[in-house]
Amino acid sequence: MPRWMTLVGLLLLPTDGFASDIALSRDPRDYLILAMREGRVKNLAITAPGCNVGVNCAPDSPLAPKTCGRLRVVSGIVDEPGQIAADSLCASGLFFQAFNNNMDTVCGPNCAQVEHPGDNSDCTEFFDTPIVDDLDDDGTPSCNERCEIDMGDIALLCGVELPLPDCDPDQPIIIQAHSDCPGGDAQPLNARCDLPAGVYGDITLENHAAIQFAAGTTVLCSFQAGNTAEITSAGAAQLLVPGAGGLATFATVKIKNGAKVGTECGQLSIVANGMIRLGRGGDYTVDACTLGDIIRLGHGNKLRGHFIGDVINANRGNQAVCCQSPPPSTTSTSTSSTTSTSTSSTSTTSTSSTSSSSTSSTSSTSTSTSSSSSSSTSSSTSSSSSTSSSSSSSSSSSSSSSSSSSTSTSSSSSSSSSSSSSSSSSTSSSSTTSSSVTTSTSSSSSSSTSTTSTSTSSTVLPTIPVIVGGCIPNVGPTPPPCVVTIVGRSGTFSSLQSAVNAASNGATIKVTGLCVGYTVINDRMNLTIEGVPPVSGSCPPGANDLTSTLSGGVIDRHTTPPGGVVKIVGSKNIVIRYLVVIDGGDRDGIEFHNSWSGIGHCNCVAGNEQGYELEDGDKHKITNSRVFDNVNGIRLHKGAVDTMITGNITEANSNHGIVLLDSATERNMIGSNTTRANGVDCIHLDEADYNDVLANVSGGGSADMECGNTDIRVQNDADHNEFNNNVDPGGNLVSVEFCSGPTLNGNFGNNCP
């Protein structure tokens, strides 16, 4: 259990001296998201009882980064009693309460969006910064006027002491699907790795693999989990990830799509010395904390817990239910959503109408009086009956739309949480005192009598709009097998790599079906690799236009060559077209490395590190492709020159739509692209010189289609670039951020302010 869960008293600063009758909470248990310097959140829905989203720092020096203290919330929902707070707040949606110190912002919220208005003209309220107190009592604030973080305070907030203990790179673990831990398992033959607490190296879960961490502290170098992995703990477990292993150069913790992580609030925590990155479509009940790095919360996830990081980025469609119980004095009433855990040594608060009578003798760290012995959160329909009589613990999670019935038996240490709209009846023969995030280690004995309690709740999670037009192979419910042919040659191949190996220079290779694997094209010339042309006949392809797919599957970065989908090395005139290119994992969809005159045309590229990667080469053309849901959509760096990026759609990538890096990346033309709803910038130049950025359309005409930071951003000695006729969807010229400055020279065009 992170120590910050027991350091609440250190954070309770005096009430802010403003007229609001509800001061900003400084209790970390009340925060779903607490970013130190910057937060970017899209379409996040926190259902009642809500919790907070906040940014700790506030700049007060010209040396502070411009983005420090910013919180950008696009189309968010934060129900009562949740709060949003940042020194510079830019928000749209519906919020119970909002705190903002920068009245110069013009991007909301407004009074129609704030249920409990403050004293400012936009119905926000001023507040004192930083949010986090000087926890280590060293006289240094958790964040100073230059937005410098006191890591001692953040370490205590995360429940650790610095430095983190060393991991053991010589003890890596790779866990296969439906398998025990290799080399020893605490509970063998249960199709899951039950890992004892200890010190390990890089831990990798392959697709569909499962791991249960033992209670206590486990140290590992890095952690990577494949699709639909399951990660749980047998009791309160803390994972310390110092990041000394092979994966730590980019993502210390990386969990891919469809994962199930954790079971009950406060049981599983992760503290990482590097980035934490979640995939999409997962179910997370976890306390996650980075020490001075980024947390990427992915999209389409169900989130329960607490997320603390230097910068926190949440893409669209996440839904959250808070782990923190309502205040002890709150009267029990039926609500649309509640959360609880209960143990014999903690305290619980229920938000449903009940009738109960209990007598208890319990010792705990934090207690609150409850009118119920159980509570539930729900998002589907179920009915459950629970009778306490023995010593056991149960937790259930349901996301089905059908009716179900369950019966569980538990003792005074019992926990029930569900994702369902429920009608529940429980009869308890034990008393419970619990806190949804604090667990006391004191022993207790309890005896009670209680009457039957009945609660009815209904939760309707809002529909979150998503970008239409992602990469969806048009293959029906059962993808056809991979069939690869070489034009003019008889026979077929079952993988693209085998066909490439067999083809002569100048050949055309045709792909049908779903081909899984990593393909390297090394020192070749004049090859064309193509799928079936789009059904609609138009490019960029629509959501269901392409039928031929290349998938990287699960790639282990320790293998040689490293992961990805297609990599072109030292080659000339290689054409890749009419393909869905997905799931490159930590590496790239289509990478041209030290190559010349390559063409990527009319592809749909998603789920990779870089959608397209162009490094150290020239005269490439990336045209009319849809590049969706990667880290960066299209990246040029380390000497990519004389390249044309035209007619593409780059959308919903977690960082930038199009990015040019390094001083040797020059004389490229970025023209007539549409780039929207990317997590940071639509187009980003860093140290890149003499490039033309012309007639691109950025943003989507509504707040949820805008890029998270800005349309076009220039920084760090990016000089002599032309920016002309770049517009929003309404045809209005957009402005380049930092077109000129102390380290920026010679940039010009009608987009420069």
Image (tube, helix red, strand yellow):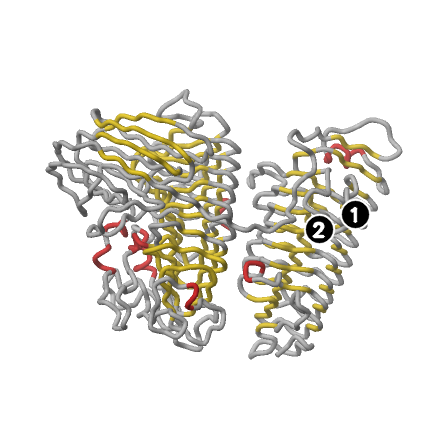
**What residue is at 44 percent from the left and 40 percent from the top?**
283
Q: Quadrant of residue 382?
A: top left
- Label disc, if present, on residue 592 of the rendered structure: 2
Crowding at label 2, few (<14), some or many (≥20) Cα neighbours within 10 Å?
Answer: many
Residue 355 in percent (x, y) is at 19, 38
Could you say which is closer to the camera, residue 434 or residue 287?
A: 434
Determine whether 653 is above or below 349 in the image. below
Label 1: element kind: loop
Report if the CB atoms under discs 1 and 2 are less than 8 Å apart. Answer: yes
Residue 575 in percent (x, y) is at 79, 47
**What residue is at 70 percent from the left and 28 percent from the top?**
481
**What residue is at 26 percent from the left and 37 percent from the top?**
374
Q: Amino acid at mark 1?
A: Ile
Crowding at label 1, few (<14), some or many (≥20) Cα neighbours within 10 Å?
Answer: many
Could you say which is closer to the camera, residue 478 or residue 296?
A: 478
Q: Amino acid at mark 2?
A: Phe
Quadrant placement of the C terminus: bottom right
Give the spatial CA distance, label 1 vs label 2: 9 Å
Label 2: element kind: strand
Sequence-earlier tag: 1 or 2: 1
Residue 547 in percent (x, y) is at 73, 38
Q: Quadrant of residue 504?
A: top right
- Total marks shown come to 2
Residue 102 in percent (x, y) is at 41, 74
| Residue at the far top in the pictured view | 189
- Label disc, if present, on residue 312 of the rendered structure: none
Task: Write down the residue under mark 1.
Answer: 574
Determine whether 136 is above or below 164 in the image. below
Quadrant placement of the N terminus: top left
